[in-house]
Amino acid sequence: MAIGTLGKFADSRPLTLGIELELQLVNLHSYDLVGAAPDLIRDVERRKLEMDIKPEMTLSMIEMATGICGDYNDALRQLTDIRDALLTSADRLNIGICGGGTHGFQLWGDRKISDSPRFNYLSDLYGYLAKQFTIFGQHVHIGCPGPDVGLYVMHGLSRYIPHFIALSASSPFVQENDTGFQSARLNSVFAFPLSGRSPFVETWADFNVFFEKMTATGVVKSMKDFYWDIRPKPEYGTVEVRVMDTPLTVLRAAQIAAYIQSLARYLIVERPFRPVEDDYLVYTFNRFQACRFGYSGTYVDPRTHEQKTIAEDILQTFARVEQHAIELGADEALRALQTDVAAGRNDTAILRADFLATESLPEVVHRQCERWRT
Amino acid sequence: MDNMFPQIWPLHPDQTMHVAVALVLAGMAGEGLARFARLPRVTGYSLTGLLLGPSMFGWFGAHDVAAFRIVIELALALLLFELGIRVDLRWLRANPWIVAASLAEASLTFIATFTVLRLMDATTGFSLVVAAIAIGTSPAVVMRVAAELRAEGQVTQRLFVFTALNVLYSVVLSKMLVGGMHGSFRNDWIAAIVHPAYLLLGSLLMGLAIAMAFRLLRRGFDLSDEHGVVVLFGLLLLALSLLHAFALPTMLAPLLAGVLVKSLDRRPHLWPRHFGTAGGVLVIFLFVLTGVTLTAGDIVAGGVAALVLIAVRLASKGAGVAMFGPIGGLSRRQTLALAVALQPMSGVAFLLTEDIRSFYPEFAAQVGAVVFCMVAVLELAGPLGVQWALRFSNESTGRGR
């Protein structure tokens, strides 16, 4: 594939799932981050496991990814298997692994950039932003039948971004402080010039035109350079949702993926609305409300301009997609999420309760490690 | 008037003045090395001790060491408890290759040192005792340099575990050897068996008592600030005096206590490193005092043997680590770094030699000639090796880099 072209949108089985989780690596003494990614990757390779484990921007991060998952149960099984295999290596090396969108008390200046041409390039380009990018997200890929449907799904999902943020939020603590945010992680993403929302383009042909114009400016070389909340991934034939914090458990990660999958089916099958550029007028407001206040944030409906809480909108949406969830075998996951939303429970609430109980961020991270094993 | 103003001139400096000047000089030497040569501070402390000791300026001598023994013991107790906290038995169970590597490097060091000394016509007893002491890696040097570099990672944590295990091996072995001497010198074979058993079992029980007391304290006190840590300081001093009362070795119980605390409870156990400022001064003093023990006579008597043993020790520790490093999860680079970082000798070797002195002074003098020469070299060069190793393995953090 020549630089500056997107290539073909690959074939993928519609509504299949893929989940990527960025994980924290900590030492088990102070529970601060530790630059152990190369050690962990080396140990996994030594055991000759067929696992998709990748280094990330700084040495204290690692990314685990499932293969293509047929449904929620398959996704949960794959996530559990990879988690267990990683934990076996981590135990051999005395490294702690945990979820959570940020590490509560790490100091960004202590981080070290992973040694690879791409990460060194990014570090040179972005300076301290690269080290600040030691944040941990969940990415969910949804298989789409063709690129135009993919773009429809991308724009259609954009109004549910606050749901995904509130459901996954697990980053209240940053650099030794409670930020007051439910998901402070996304504030670090916003610092990047190519972050935020994608342009409003509805066909793959138009998307190619946009992409070629951008590459012609020399600002981007590939889709990887866009840090959008949702972006198409032509190599996989998927749309990738990237706003979630890594949850504290793989169960939660699988449940959130199941919800996104159900929404995608609802959009593709029912085509409930046609996206318009003006849908994005409320986008950053809603997104901010979700990051700051979680379930109790304000949600402005892009069409009716009606205001409600994000929790209300999530619960209404659950009811709307229920049949699709049942078709996909994701209804169990949605019911679990529904209970949590009704009770106002998410991972940020758990982390804050842990801090209240222990008054110590290292102890909070210790508990994160324990939770990750469950 | 004569009573109120006794003759002042010429000044009669007391011991406090010697100590004070030593501390000032040590602090300045440490800062100087760190700032201008980016070398570990501990090398400066040890250098000050060596210069002030009998082999050079003669400000201090063996009698001072006896007087300040409690300082050395307390500094080591603090360090060993802190070191023990870094040893999680669950890790050793999850990765038995670590224990294998540790046993390999320690036994190779013991066997090689013994063999070389025998080839140099030393007596069996002497060779065994020096070999037992040579196993040890200095916890003081390792922990100080790692703290200075804010190091963390595979090499650092294995270095802590190996150092802790080496202290264990070398204390246990040397106690058993002293027991053996009771047997052969005094023909008291009951003491030869019962005494080491008493020392080991007593240390274990005392370690358990410290660990339990710590767990109680941790419930009520925030040990992570300078005020809470005073309580912990007191606890270890109390333990030390009890160990003296029971005539138990002072090095094992604090170490075992730390291991028990961490292995029973995986939560972070954090307090200001080296117990804050007071602990920091004690540790500096530890380095100065171990430096002052070397005499010119020692260098003549043991210098050559010490140099040979240092080379043997480097080779055997390196071989042992290399044997099981990669299978235990280390890269080749990390294996090399770990081997180099295990070299320092300091306070533990010194105390073990002193312990023998209380039973067999003449024999201890022979042992000391070799051991103190090794300590002198390895507490100056050892910290440089540890610093190099932790940087080489990319485990140092922040400004210290």
Image (cartoon, coloured by chain):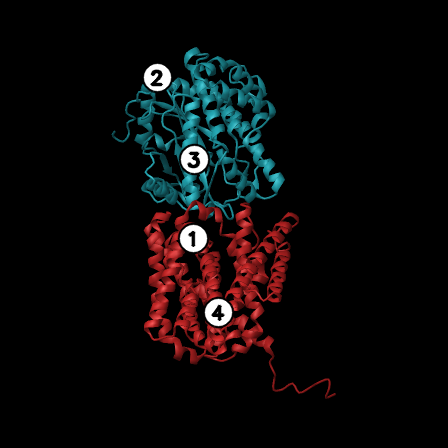
Chain colours: A cyan, B red
Both on one chain, marks 2 and 4?
Answer: no
The single residue placed furthest to the right in the displayed view is B1
* Residue in view at x 45 percent, y 46 percent: B93
Q: Position of residue A337 (x, y in %)?
A: 53, 23
Q: Residues within 10 Å of mark 3 (few under 14, many from 20)?
A: some
Determine which residue is flagged by label 3: A84
Determine which residue is flagged by label 4: B178
Specify the amino acid type for callout 1. Arg
* Residue in view at x 49 percent, y 33 percent: A186
Both on one chain, marks 2 and 3?
Answer: yes
Q: Nearer the viewer, mark 2 or mark 4?
A: 4
Both on one chain, marks 1 and 2?
Answer: no
Specify the amino acid type for callout 2. Pro
Determine which residue is flagged by label 1: B158
Mark 4 and 1 residues: CB-CB less than 8 Å, in contact? no
- Which dot marks residue A145? 2
Q: In the depicted view, which residue is nearer to us: B115 or B228?
A: B115
Q: Residues within 10 Å of mark 4 (few under 14, many from 20)?
A: many
Q: Nearer the viewer, mark 4 or mark 1?
A: 4
Q: Nearer the viewer, mark 1 or mark 2?
A: 1
Task: Give the chain letter at badge 3.
Answer: A
Specify the amino acid type for callout 3. Asp
Task: Give the chain letter at badge 4.
Answer: B
